[in-house]
Amino acid sequence: MSKPRILIPMSIQFSVRYILRTGLLDRIREVAEPVILLGWRDKDLEKELQESGVEVHPMTEVRSSNDYERVRSWLNLVHKKRLKTPSEPIWERRADVGRSLYHRLRRRTRNKAIHVITALKGGDQSLRRKEQEIFQTETNGPEIQKQIDLLKPDAAFSLTPSLLNEEVALRACARRGVPLCASILSFDNITTRGWCAVPFDQYMVWNRYNADELLRAYPEVSSNHISIVGAPQFDFYWDRSYLWEESEWRSQLGLPAGRPVILFGGGYFACAPHEPRFLAQIDAAIEAKEIPGNPIILFRNHPVDPIERWQSVLKDAKHVVYDDPWPTGRITGHANVRTRDIQKLASCLYHSSVHVNVASTMALDGAIFDRPQVGPAYDDTPGSSYDQTARDLYHQEHYLPITRSGGVDIAHNRQEMIQAIRLALQEPGRLRDGRKRLVRELCTYDDGRATERVAQAIHSFLAQTVPAREVVAKTA
């Protein structure tokens, strides 16, 4: 009997790292024929996939009307209410920044009205029915359905179902009765993303927190359908073949020999618009010899963050070396993440003496290598517009286990940030127990075998679902 066809959308660059570079795709090919829906055009990536024996097709971009987007926004509000996440008031405060009092009140009044309507008997179900109705007429969902019908998948596997292009393709699979499996890409995706219209037969998540979030957000999901597997994208960090020698690393990035390195991982601009100030303050502190040892800063910006907001600081900085994670397709989120890119990241994490980032996943990456973590949580720009939201970032639901672990030195002003960096350089073992704790809490496993757990879960999923469907088809 031929292997089942498993549809795998690859919507963003992190999908390349997770599915292809970890070796997961090869493990899937042992029991199935992968059919890749690629979210962007990349001839080299397409060629690499095809040469490995994988079928590749372009992912159709979703088009929708304003009416449809409005209904989806209402469903997102209902979803957040059901989730009951402590992050919601934090997001509300962030949304208020820069808005006039009138627009704040207008937004709150609208949200409250939607909650009142959906709280009425049958209100939630009525809104979902409305979404299903206009989905057929106000989006190009029927066009995408035709593409999926032609591809004839027997199963589907998703990493980022919260992205609309991916969701609609999976929705088309569901209409065919195709069993669906999801391995949620990141530990924040369940609480920070909106409502997903697609129910899955199997979920894989990083940790027990994510499992609880799924059960809260989607009451129809059973705990029996959730597996805790860890984070495959971190498996590289337990493999020393991904580490360059320090001399090679310094040579590749243009870092001077002998100077300790402070790795500054930039975040996404919407989280902390004032973040470049922290980079400038650390640079100034080195120049003023407030930080001993004459360190140098290695600045890596977020893969989808525009470099323009950092340029004024970089232009005047005296102790900063800039490294772009992967230039091609960076802002769009569409890049072919290659093995060299992963080696460079792992080497930066390993060879740097201390890491600075604003409530980023990078704190997890760095803690795996047992490097001191410093988290700025303040805004001392004139007006301090983002001071409260900067502190709030560390109290979002997904980040709370990191904050409470004691593994990150959270700084509430410039003096605390510089002191934390000094201590990290002088006492690298400080807060080590907290770093180990946050890795256990968020990644669950510290063995570098998450990819294998995902592969085994997919194998089991296909064995349990696809043959049963074939039997039903034969007897119908």
Image (cartoon, rainbow, N blue to C red):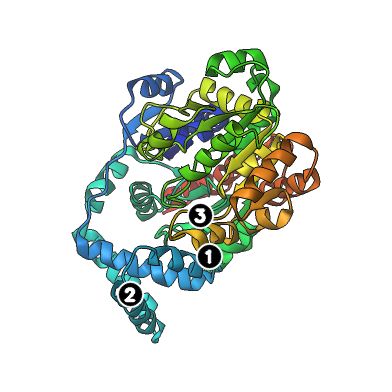
Please report the residue visible at 33 percent of the width from the left and 80 percent of the height from the top. Answer: 109
Is the residue under label 2 in contact with that under label 3 (CB below 8 Å)? no
How many residues crowd mark 2 within 10 Å: few (<14), some (14–19), many (20+)?
Answer: few
- Residue 295's spot in the image, x, y percent? 64, 28
Please report the residue visible at 60 percent of the width from the left and 34 percent of the height from the top. Answer: 288
The residue type indicated by label 1 comes to: Ser
Q: Is residue 158 visible?
A: no
Is the residue under label 2 in contact with that under label 1 (CB below 8 Å)? no
Question: Can you identify the residue that label 2 sits on?
Answer: 101
* Extreme-bottom residue of the structure: 121
The residue type indicated by label 3 comes to: Asp
- Quadrant location of residue 268? top left
Question: Can you identify the residue that label 3 sits on?
Answer: 380
Question: Can you identify the residue that label 1 sits on?
Answer: 87
The span from disc 1 to disc 2 (Cα, nearest Å) is 22 Å
How many residues crowd mark 3 within 10 Å: few (<14), some (14–19), many (20+)?
Answer: some
- Quadrant location of residue 212? bottom right
Which quarter of the rendering shows the C terminus?
A: bottom left
Q: What secondary structure is marked by label 1? A: loop
- Residue 341's spot in the image, x, y percent? 51, 24
